[in-house]
Amino acid sequence: MFKIFLPDIKQILHDFKITSKVSSFIELQRTDYEKENPDSREVRLIDKASLADGSSVVIRFKNENDVTQELVEKQSQFAEMLRTNGISCPRQYRANDNFAKCYSMNGYDVIVTVEEFVDGELKCVTPETAEKTGRLLAQTHNIAEHNHFHVKNPVLFDPFTRNDLFAFTEFKLAGENLADDCLPLYQKILDKYSKYMQILSPLQDEPRFAVQGDISICNLYQLKDGNLGIFDFNRCGDNNLYCDAVMQAVFEARLMDYPQGYGEEYSDKILLSFLSGYQSERPFSSSQQKLFPYLYSIIDAFWASDIVWDDNSLLKEYERKNTTAVHKWLEEILKRLSFSNSFQIL
């Protein structure tokens, strides 16, 4: 397991031109790659170092198969560009004019970045904070587009590739051995999906720009004046900005915690507030408004929790050979693709 010691922290802070002495450091987050593979040399570690002057910094260590120093540098450049253009983001520190520096430490090769520590992590979402999040996201989109900024990296939420919001690929695999009475429903679903993706296909040809890529859970913080800031650019990459807006809105509405006493019915209010905030800074065009029901219905129909992860999900009922439950799921998915749960974003 990758371990860090006080002399390592001191060396890093010296390299990143931080002169205040380290009083202590703690581990904030670690991905345990050794759990799956004891011989793994991959690393994702986040430490917080407290300094003698009362400030703190966050030190990120990475060694992952799909991560290069060039990628981390570009992601850090994007974060710092947003900050210098008025977005509340932690300051990124430099070592020899670079934001990312490679080290060989304690038997591991790692890419290291250092940034300002910020308080006020947003733990739950209300319509008010959702509106602010949408506005914040639109501002970052405007900055990325205005500066023609790009980060060549896959994002979590892309409707034209496999993504973490909806699970059409997994749904399609289940069709290979469905019971005969399920096949007509299954084929109708495939036909509607194909039709909707064809309608959405012009989005593939539009320019893509850098996005933070994962704006909600654990990555937002609230300032004393009530405004929001954003950190953690680990999933930063290029995306169609309209798709990013819609998918980040659904993510925040469905996956962030709500205040105590509120249930799933609260999600539509969150979604509409997010989109309202976004449009106040970056209005959707008439063509984008027309595309919304198609994109939203695909997300809703193939929602990953319903298809894969929940105990009563489609795939788990399929594995149990519960034909009745599978049939009900297919009916529900087809219903969602008929815009039954959709709405306009105006």
Image (cartoon, rainbow, N blue to C red):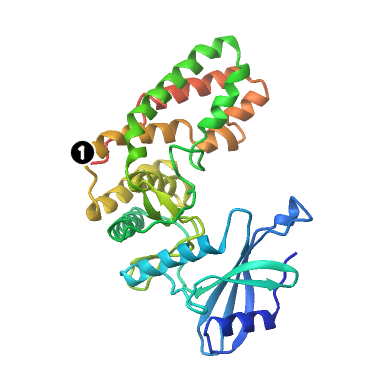
Q: Amino acid at mark 1?
A: Ser
Q: Which residue shows up at 74% across the image and 50% down it?
A: 36
Q: Which residue is mark 1?
A: 286
**Residue 227 image offset from top left, x and y in percent:** 33, 67
Classify residue 166 as left or right of residue 65: left
**Residue 124 image offset from top left, x and y in percent:** 45, 57
Question: Is the N terminus in the top left, top right, bottom left or bottom right quadrant?
Answer: bottom right
Question: Is the C terminus in the top left, top right, bottom left or bottom right quadrant?
Answer: top left
Label 1 environment density (alpha carbons within 10 Å; few <14, some 14–19, many ≥20): few
Classify residue 317 as left or right of residue 193: right
Q: Residue furthest right?
A: 38
Identify whether 269 is placed above or below 61.
above
Classify residue 148 as left or right of residue 1: left
**Residue 289 image offset from top left, x and y in percent:** 25, 38
Front residue of this view, candidates 50 and 140: 140
**Residue 236 image offset from top left, x and y in percent:** 46, 56
Identify whether 315 is placed above or below 64.
above
Q: How many marks?
A: 1
> On the image, which quarter does residue 216 sit in?
bottom left
Q: Residue furthest top?
A: 180
Identify whether 104 is placed above or below 186.
below
Front residue of this view, candidates 221 and 206: 206
Classify residue 272 as left or right of residue 91: left
> On the image, which quarter does residue 41 sit in?
bottom right
Identify whether 315 is placed above or below 78.
above
Front residue of this view, candidates 39 and 326: 39
Is disc 1 placed on a helix, strand or loop? helix
Whether residue 88 is visible: no
Q: Which residue shows up at 55% across the image and 28% down it?
A: 171
Q: Which residue shows up at 58% across the image and 34% down it?
A: 308
Whether residue 304 is visible: yes
